[in-house]
Image (tube, rainbow, N blue to C red):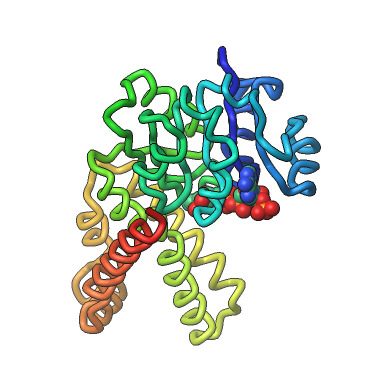
């Protein structure tokens, strides 16, 4: 990378991205600027990655080609304000949930903004992030952003900024829905006389295997479900019970509730 890559906030998400880039040899530690006010976190960046993070931003940020915003959304305004003079020329990538791109334009002075909605599996390189770019972002810059986020997992572009609320509701919050499902499977395991640990292993491995099957198969999820659901069999008994309880409608309502909340939070942060 010719010009430095900067991170504002050097916590979990920043660590996942820059750690992956360093391991892949895509960028050198000397070409990364991190602004991180929390001293123990700066010590960790030095120990883990050999990066000397800055406690406060300085004029070196003006050299950065890309600036990644990885602070908690409620801290964005306070983090950006003192850095304003150095932000206008860069491409900005935000991984902050809920901050509208118009706020990023206002506080950075740059129209070249990409918003990303990552999820927690990004921390182990298995994430799924939705991406939205403002019109001023070029095709080459989009490709550079994809490259930047590759260590955290997969990416998917959406056409409108509002679509990010749907991404938030599906993949952003999705890991929590999945864990709720696993918790219920574990409780059922105990009901049937297995241990919670046996239930945890059976449920997680089954979910991971089913997800891998879905990802690798040309068949739709519906076909894959029907294939294990022979009439009168055990799976049929379970699916019939779930349908009687309205599980699918409840999941749809839950995801739409998350989308509405994402839109509300966006308005609050905007
Ligand atoms: N973790 C995920 O999987 C995930 C998923 C989706 C979205 N996100 C988004 O990613 C963003 C970062 O999340 P995270 O989990 O990486 O949080 P995090 O681990 O708390 O990292 C944020 C870091 O920024 C630092 N910071 C605070 N104020 C700052 C300032 N003025 N300038 C520079 N750095 C500052 C924090 O220091 P202090 O500890 O001193 O405050 C902290 O070390 C959030 O906006 C979140 O919505 C994360």
Q: Toward the viewer: 34 or 116?
A: 34
Query: In the visual, does 137 lie left or right of 246?
Result: right
Q: Where is residue 91 in the image (x, y as percent from the top left)?
A: 44, 27
Identity of the residue drawn at 71% across and 21% down = 30
Query: In the visual, does 146 lie left or right of 241?
Result: right
The tally of labels here is 0
Point out the image quarter for the N terminus.
top right
Q: Quadrant of residue 267?
A: bottom left
Identity of the residue drawn at 46% across and 81% down = 188
Query: In the visual, does 166 lie left or right of 109?
Result: left
Q: Residue furthest top?
A: 2
Q: Position of residue 70 (x, y in %)?
A: 55, 44
Q: Toward the viewer: 118 or 220?
A: 118
Identity of the residue drawn at 47% across and 48% down = 96
Q: Can residue 120 be seen in this view?
A: no
Q: Where is residue 195 in the image (x, y as percent from the top left)?
A: 60, 79
Query: In the visual, does 216 lie left or right of 246?
Result: right
As drawn, 45 above or below 235: above
Q: Toward the viewer: 56 or 229?
A: 56
Q: Quadrant of residue 159?
A: top left
As drawn, 202 above or below 31: below
Q: Can residue 268 be seen in this view?
A: yes
Q: Position of residue 265 (x, y in %)?
A: 38, 61
As drawn, 95 above or below 65: below
As drawn, 189 above or below 229: below
Q: Quadrant of residue 170?
A: bottom left
Identity of the residue drawn at 66% across and 37% down = 35
């Amino acid at each position: 990378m010719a010009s430095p890559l900067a991170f504002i906030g050097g916590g979990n998400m920043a660590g996942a991205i820059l750690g992956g880039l360093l391991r892949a040899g895509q960028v050198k530690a000397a070409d990364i600027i991190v602004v991180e006010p929390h001293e123990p976190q700066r010590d960790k960046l030095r120990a883990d990655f050999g990066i000397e993070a800055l406690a406060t931003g300085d004029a070196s940020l003006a050299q950065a080609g890309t600036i990644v915003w990885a602070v908690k959304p409620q801290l964005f305004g306070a983090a950006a304000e003192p850095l304003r003079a150095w932000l206008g020329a860069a491409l900005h990538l935000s991984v902050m949930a809920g901050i509208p791109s118009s706020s990023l334009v206002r506080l950075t002075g740059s129209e070249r903004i990409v918003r990303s909605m990552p999820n927690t599996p990004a921390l182990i390189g298995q994430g799924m992030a939705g991406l939205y770019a403002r019109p001023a972002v070029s095709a080459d810059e989009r490709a550079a952003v994809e490259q930047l986020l590759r260590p955290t997992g997969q990416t998917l572009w959406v056409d409108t900024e509002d679509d990010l609320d749907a991404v938030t509701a599906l993949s952003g919050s999705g890991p929590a829905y999945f864990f709720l499902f696993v918790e219920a499977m574990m409780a059922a395991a105990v009901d049937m006389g297995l241990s919670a640990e046996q239930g945890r292993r059976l449920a997680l491995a089954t979910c991971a295997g089913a997800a891998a099957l879905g990802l690798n198969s040309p068949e739709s999820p519906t076909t894959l479900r029907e294939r294990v659901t022979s009439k009168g069999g055990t799976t049929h008994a379970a699916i019939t019970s779930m349908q009687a309880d309205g599980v699918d409608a409840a999941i749809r309502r839950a995801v739409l509730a998350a989308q509405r909340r994402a839109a509300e939070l966006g308005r609050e942060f905007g």
